[in-house]
Structure formats: structure tokens, C-alpha cells
């Protein structure tokens, strides 16, 4: 076997169909496992010295989970109208989490830990996916509430020649220079900067309409040139078809490369699957910190490197004690060290830190690792058994000088924005952080694959993942039911998913209408009673669309810990290991 094929010689048993199953199937194949059928509800993976099974609990239909766990409310926050994402987001993340569990249990058995069974469910995965928003809604200080602030002027923008595009800026100077060059009024530019900057945190952006008017008066090529001269980043909004035609589309989401021969890593005979594994990270924002958060939930010890004075995002409101709630939910429980690795002494400290580590993860800008002398080759000279992991925006897809690889830019380029948009509407990304979350899941998955490869080959190595590859995973075509939508009751919204239209109409006390009149008939019937009445009467095919994220904690108390805010816990339960 090779480092890039860590499951060579393994046999996977895959049951049934659907987005969870198909996601697991694709990813195990890309790791070189042979795939066959299996018993209903059980994913099996067996190979030399290993036999594990994963049992996802029965999942409600995708849109019922999205409604129940606040995803619809977040996705529709800018329009003040909850709505489905349009892709099987929770199901695909659950599939990736299933692969993570299988890889973690495989690694555990290879290290002498008899973990043999994994249970997980989509609700736990969904709560992790919106964990930052739940933390903000339950923070000690000024918890965020639902803001009914619809915006008809949110990104993306449209050029004079009709090209929709996203923008990204990391400085007020670049923002000012770009819009000034497009002719926007100074007062408008200043008014738009703060809501633009906070759109990640709030999942909404109320921008001045004049910014759109400035873009609409300029061709896209002129906009590109102005962006290049001012330090702004722009990216056209592309279709799913355009993305699928790219030469790199469909490639594995991880690039695994073997390094030097080394010992296979420490053994462990008890505890969670990654007990005894030490991960060192130098990351910012969401993708990298979430990846190591997932690894810590699987049992790893994580040491986080921050600049002197700490990560500035620690002070982002709302606060949970002395730390940002949104920062805490990603980094709680990690050991923190402050190092200035721009200095020679700081770089020596980093090398000392990784000398006995199993994983080093960063999400630095392209080329920064070589510039600092902290690239894979330098670290492998100190620790040959290290898994050197990179979580980036674009991978190698857009060359050596790509635009900013952030969530909304990747949504635009990858076709995710197109996939999220109902037919007949102009494509627009969701302002809920979605690709960042998927990127964290994929990064953790790639690190687990690399650790299995190290254990089997006796070689250290590297693994690179990207937000673009994570976005690609989300483009799986959903399979809607006969009725699959959000409908207004007398006092709120209900998500309804069912194949049995006749039974639904019976519960609604209406005759079976022609297909083209079905949605209107359902809405008219639901409008006669409040949500609570219909929730009880319709049973498991209907779920109220929840806007109050804080209420999720009282509904799922066993899934959260409290440390100044509610922190979603592990979606996995492992059999054969003590926690």
C-alpha cells in the first residue's frame, strides 16, 4: 500500500442509498477501500487487524433537520424569511462524520485500542455545524438574538455587463479604495464597511443600495482591474455546470504525500480513538480551529499557537466570560501557547513544540510556511513521523496567486451559490458560514486518513485540504420528496416532508388537489391553526421552523456543555473504549 491509499486492502460494507450513504461510499473509495453491500443501517470497515462498524441513528429527512436545528433560519436571516439551503448539507456532513468515525476507530485498533463500534446522528452533526451561532445566542454578555433586518442590497453584486460577483476585503483601506474608484459616495462606503465586515458573524448584511449601483455602472473587466490595484478580491459567481467542467473537479478532497520513514506513532489501549495523539495548530477563523476541535472530540490533545497577546478574535462580541463565545466554541479545552514565529527564537519554539507531536496543522497564506522556514521539509527534519497538515482555500486550483479563499468567495466559484438558489432567481451565496464548516470537517477527515497511513506505512507525511474541495462535496444532487417545503401556519412556519400526499391531505382535512394546486392547498389549510396544533397532528412528517437558536439547548440538553455559552458536544459514541 502507499501513503496516498491508506485503506488499500480494506473492505467496506455500505448499506442502502441517500446522501449520507453516497457520501461515505465516495470517500471510502477515494481512500482505496473496496466497497460492497452490507446490512441495513450499518457501515462496516475491515482490513488487516481491523474490524469496525458505524451505525448512524435513523435520520429525519434533510429539510426537517434543517428546520429543527436552526439552519433554515440562519440561511434566510438576510431576507428575514427562513428557507431551506437547497443542498443536503446535514446529510453530507453526517456522511463525512461517519468516515471520520470509521478512520478514527481504525486508527485506534491499529494502535491497540479495541474501539469497534461508532454511533452518531444527524442532529448532533447539525448542532455542531451551527455551534458558533448557538454559542452567540447563549453568551453571558449581550447574547445575539434574531434580527428581523431584511436586506435587498446584500452581496453578491452585478456588473454593467451582467456578471454577478462576490467581493472580499481584509482592510478598510482596500474597501475604501475599491468603492471610491467605482464612484460610490464616501458616506456610503463608510456606512457599508461594518455590516460587510460582520456578515460572517451575523449571517446577514444590510448594505447600502448605492454600492450595487456603483458596480452596475462598471464592466466586470474594469472591476477586476480596480480590485487588483486597490487590494480588493473579486470572484464571479459560477454555475454548478461550470465548476464540474473544471479539470480538478471530482478529484479526492485530500492530497496525501508520504514523507520520511518513521515510527508509526504511539500506541494506546484505552480511551477515545485518538487518546495519546498530540495535535499542534497555528490557525485562524473557522476552518482550522474546527478541524482540531473535531479531533479533540475524538480524543486528541490539542496545543494551539497564538500570536503574542492572543488571537484578536478572542475579543469578538458577544462575550462568554473573558472570551468571545464564537471563539470559545471552536477552541475550548485546547492548550494555548503564545509564540512570535516571525522571530528566530519563536520558530525554534515551534520546532520544539512539534518535536514530539503527531500532527501540525496551519492555514497560513500560500508560501508563508517556506518563508518562515516552517514548511513540511523543515519540520520532518526535526520529526520524521509528523503529519504536516494544511487547510487552505483553493488548493492548487487557481495557481500561485489566487483570490482570497474565504467562505463566500469559494461558494461563488464552486457553484455552491448556484446550487443554493431556487430556479429563476439570481444566484447568491448563503451568509451562514457553510463552506468554512464543511472545510473543517474535511480537514479533520484528511488528517485522520494521514494518521492511518502513517500507522500502516511507518512513514510521516503531509495532507492538504481546501475549502474548494469541501464545497465540491456539497454539490451532490438532493432528492426531494413529493412534498418537501416550508409552509405558513397561523402563527409560524412548518417544514413538511412526505411522499404520502394522500395521507397528508387527510390530516389536513382537505381533498386531494391537482399537483399544481397542492402547495396552495396545503398553505390555505395550515393557515387555520397555530404551529403547535399542526405539529402534534401531523407527527414526524412536520417540524416547526425554529428561529430561536438558544431554545435548541433546552431541547437537546445532553448535547451541550456550558462555559460562558452553550458548547455543542461530540456527535459520536464509541463502543469498546472508555471516555
Image: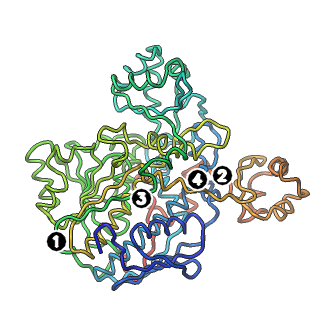
Q: Position of residue 170 (x, y in %)?
A: 35, 32
Sequence-wise first label, 4 or 2: 4
What is the secondary structure assignment of the residue under circle 1? Answer: loop
Q: Spatial distance from mark 1 to mark 2, Cα to Cα?
A: 52 Å
Residue sitting at the far right: 511
Q: Spatial distance from mark 4 to mark 3, Cα to Cα?
A: 17 Å
Seen from the viewer's position, the closer of residues 401 and 577 is 401
Q: Spatial distance from mark 1 to mark 4, Cα to Cα?
A: 42 Å
In the displayed structure, would residue 499 be above or below residue 530? Answer: below
Sequence-wise first label, 1 or 2: 1
Q: Nearer the viewer, mark 1 or mark 3?
A: 1
Residue underneath mark 3: 441
Q: Position of residue 508 (x, y in %)?
A: 85, 58
Query: Dot 2, how many residues are within 10 Å of its Cα: few (below 14), some (14-19), or many (20+)?
Result: many
Where the N terminus falls, by quadrant? Answer: bottom left
Query: Dot 1, how many residues are within 10 Å of its Cα: few (below 14), some (14-19), or many (20+)?
Result: some
Q: Spatial distance from mark 4 to mark 2, Cα to Cα?
A: 17 Å
What is the secondary structure assignment of the residue under circle 3? Answer: helix
Where the C terminus falls, by quadrant? Answer: bottom left
Seen from the viewer's position, the closer of residues 17 and 534 is 17
Q: Spatial distance from mark 3 to mark 2, Cα to Cα?
A: 25 Å
Residue underneath mark 4: 87
Q: Nearer the viewer, mark 3 or mark 2?
A: 3
What is the secondary structure assignment of the residue under circle 4? Answer: loop
Residue underneath mark 2: 545
Left or right of 228? Residue 34 is right
Residue underneath mark 1: 262
Seen from the viewer's position, the closer of residues 358 and 139 is 358
Q: Nearer the viewer, mark 1 or mark 2?
A: 1
Task: Check whether the beta carbons of the residues at disc 4 and disc 3 lie within 8 A of each other.
Answer: no
Amino acid at each position: 500500500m502507499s501513503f496516498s491509499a491508506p485503506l488499500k486492502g480494506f473492505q467496506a460494507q455500505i448499506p442502502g442509498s441517500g446522501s449520507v450513504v453516497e457520501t461515505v461510499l465516495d470517500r471510502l473509495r477515494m481512500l482505496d477501500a473496496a466497497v460492497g453491500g452490507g446490512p441495513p443501517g450499518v457501515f462496516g470497515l475491515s482490513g488487516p487487524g481491523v474490524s469496525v462498524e458505524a451505525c448512524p441513528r435513523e435520520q429525519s429527512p434533510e429539510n426537517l433537520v434543517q428546520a429543527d436545528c436552526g439552519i433554515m433560519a440562519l440561511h434566510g436571516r438576510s431576507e428575514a424569511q427562513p428557507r431551506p439551503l437547497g443542498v443536503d448539507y446535514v446529510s453530507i456532513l453526517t456522511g463525512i462524520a461517519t468516515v471520520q468515525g470509521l478512520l478514527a476507530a481504525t486508527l485506534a485498533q491499529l494502535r491497540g485500542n479495541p474501539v469497534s463500534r461508532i454511533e452518531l446522528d444527524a442532529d448532533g452533526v447539525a448542532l455542531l455545524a451551527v455551534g458558533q451561532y448557538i454559542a452567540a445566542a447563549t453568551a453571558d454578555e449581550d447574547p445575539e438574538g434574531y434580527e428581523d433586518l431584511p436586506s435587498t442590497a446584500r452581496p453578491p453584486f452585478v456588473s454593467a455587463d451582467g456578471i454577478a460577483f462576490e467581493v472580499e476585503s481584509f482592510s478598510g483601506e482596500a474597501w475604501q479604495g475599491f468603492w471610491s474608484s467605482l464612484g460610490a459616495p464616501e458616506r456610503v462606503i463608510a456606512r457599508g464597511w461594518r455590516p460587510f465586515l460582520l456578515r460572517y458573524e451575523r449571517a446577514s448584511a444590510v448594505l447600502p443600495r448605492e454600492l450595487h449601483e456603483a458596480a452596475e455602472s462598471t464592466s466586470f473587466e474594469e472591476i477586476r482591474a480596480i480590485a487588483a490595484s486597490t487590494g480588493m478580491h473579486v470572484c464571479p459567481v459560477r454555475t454548478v455546470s461550470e465548476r464540474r467542467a473544471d479539470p480538478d473537479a471530482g478529484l479526492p478532497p485530500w492530497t496525501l504525500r508520504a514523507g520520511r520513514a518513521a515510527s508509526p506513532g504511539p500506541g494506546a489501549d484505552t480511551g477515545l480513538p485518538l487518546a495519546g495523539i498530540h495535535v499542534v495548530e497555528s490557525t485562524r477563523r473557522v476552518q482550522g480551529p474546527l478541524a482540531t476541535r473535531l479531533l479533540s472530540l475524538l480524543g486528541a490533545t490539542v496545543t494551539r499557537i497564538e500570536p503574542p497577546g492572543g488571537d484578536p478574535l478572542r475579543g469578538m462580541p458577544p462575550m462568554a466570560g473573558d472570551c468571545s463565545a464564537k471563539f470559545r466554541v471552536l477552541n475550548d479545552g485546547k492548550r494555548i501557547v503564545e509564540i512570535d514565529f516571525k522571530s528566530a527564537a519563536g520558530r525554534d519554539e515551534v520546532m520544539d513544540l512539534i518535536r514530539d507531536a503527531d500532527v501540525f496543522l496551519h492555514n497560513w497564506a500560500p508560501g508563508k510556511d517556506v518563508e518562515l522556514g516552517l514548511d513540511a521539509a523543515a519540520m520532518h527534519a526535526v520529526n520524521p513521523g509528523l503529519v504536516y497538515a494544511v487547510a487552505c482555500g483553493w488548493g492548487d486550483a487557481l495557481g500561485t496567486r489566487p483570490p482570497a479563499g474565504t467562505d463566500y468567495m469559494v461558494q461563488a466559484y464552486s457553484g455552491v451559490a448556484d446550487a443554493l438558489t431556487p430556479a429563476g432567481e439570481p444566484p447568491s451565496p448563503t451568509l451562514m458560514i457553510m463552506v468554512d464548516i464543511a472545510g473543517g470537517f474535511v480537514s479533520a477527515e484528511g488528517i485522520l486518513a494521514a494518521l492511518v497511513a502513517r500507522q500502516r506505512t511507518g512513514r510521516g507525511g503531509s495532507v492538504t485540504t481546501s475549502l474548494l474541495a469541501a464545497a465540491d462535496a456539497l454539490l451532490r444532487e438532493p432528492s426531494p420528496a413529493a412534498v418537501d417545503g416550508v409552509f405558513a401556519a397561523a402563527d409560524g412556519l412548518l417544514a413538511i416532508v412526505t411522499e404520502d400526499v394522500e395521507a397528508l391531505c387527510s390530516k389536513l382535512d382537505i381533498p386531494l388537489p391537482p399537483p399544481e394546486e397542492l402547495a396552495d392547498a396545503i398553505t390555505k389549510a395550515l393557515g387555520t391553526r397555530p404551529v403547535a396544533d399542526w405539529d402534534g397532528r401531523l407527527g414526524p412528517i412536520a417540524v416547526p421552523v425554529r428561529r430561536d437558536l438558544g431554545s435548541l439547548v433546552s431541547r437537546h440538553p445532553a448535547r451541550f456543555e456550558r462555559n460562558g455559552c452553550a458548547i455543542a458536544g461530540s456527535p459520536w459514541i464509541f463502543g469498546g473504549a472508555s471516555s
